Image (spheres, helix red, strand yellow):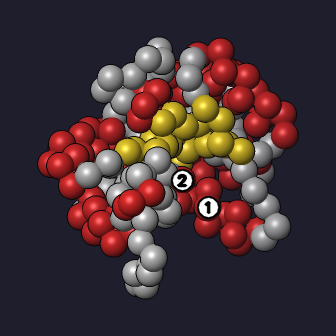
Amino acid sequence: MSYIADFEKALEIGRPPNIKSLFPNSKALLVSGKVIDRALLAKGKAMTMAANGRNHLVIRGALMAAQRAQAALIIEIARSEGGASSYCPTNYWNMARQVDALCNELGITVPVAIHADHYGIKSAADLPFARTEIPSLFDAGITSIAVDASHMLDDDNLLACIDLNSFIPSWAGYETEVGEIKVPKDCLRQTRPSF
């Protein structure tokens, strides 16, 4: 097969359902983070870069560099930067649109995942809102997510991640965070739960 034929086949089978629906005529190879992860594991001794897509210029530069290196790329933004109360022009709901447009404009042919990084869950009280918001991220073109419940104790973190699992498409990349970040010292346990 030629490179063009391989690329066309990758577009046909590699793009997840949300991307196919949002961008039916696109030539951008927007893929699930799970696809990139599995490809790296299969290749062995390989890695990819995750670039923070805080603005259009950063996304453009990261895409151009990835194309030049012929390397898969993850464009990501954290909830604090790109969530509902974000401070960046790029957010969870417009990032895929920007990446798709730039890939088509620049002729980018490398696989690119659209990642919602550090989707923070600080307590069980955050779960009802997350159950509604997370599906909207995938509706907007997110292809992988990192649920970060690391502010909670490990057992509560695990339970929160299990709870939210059913709101994340099975084809999507799903990452979780382990460990405590910014918890008061009196919350730390002497004995750790084992799972």
**Where in the figure is residue 134, as x and y percent of width and height?**
28, 45
Answer above or below: position of 153 versus 129. Answer: below
Instruction: Tell which of 80 and 165 is nearer to you.
Output: 80
Quarter in which the N terminus is drawn:
bottom right
Residue that mark 2 sits on:
33
Q: Is residue 12 left or right of residue 157?
A: right
**Where in the figure is residue 37, as x and y percent of width and height?**
61, 61
Instruction: Tell which of 28 and 4 is nearer to you.
Output: 28
Check whether the beta carbons of the residues at disc 2 and disc 1 lie within 8 A of each other.
yes
- Residue at the front extreme of this rendering: 186
The circle drawn on residue 47 is none
Residue 122 shows in the view: yes
Instruction: Tell which of 180 and 21 is nearer to you.
Output: 180
Quarter in which the C terminus is drawn:
bottom left
Residue in view at x 42 percent, y 52 percent: 183
Instruction: Tell which of 146 and 169 is nearer to you.
Output: 146
**Where in the figure is residue 32, as x and y percent of width and height?**
50, 52
- Residue at the bottom extreme of this rendering: 194
The image quarter containing residue 185 is bottom left
The image quarter containing residue 158 is bottom left
Residue that mark 1 sits on:
37
Determine whether the residue tagged by mark 2 lies in a helix, strand or loop.
helix
Query: How far apart in space, not on screen, are marks 2 and 1 (Cα)?
Result: 6 Å
Q: Amino acid at mark 1?
A: Asp
Residue in view at x 65 percent, y 35 percent: 51
Residue in view at x 69 percent, y 52 percent: 6
**Where in the figure is residue 144, as x and y percent of width and height?**
46, 50
Residue in view at x 33 percent, y 39 percent: 137
Report crowding for label 1: few under 14, some 14 to 19, many 20 or more residues within 10 A (C-alpha): some
Q: Amino acid at mark 2?
A: Gly
Answer above or below: position of 102 versus 171. Answer: above
Residue 18 shows in the view: no
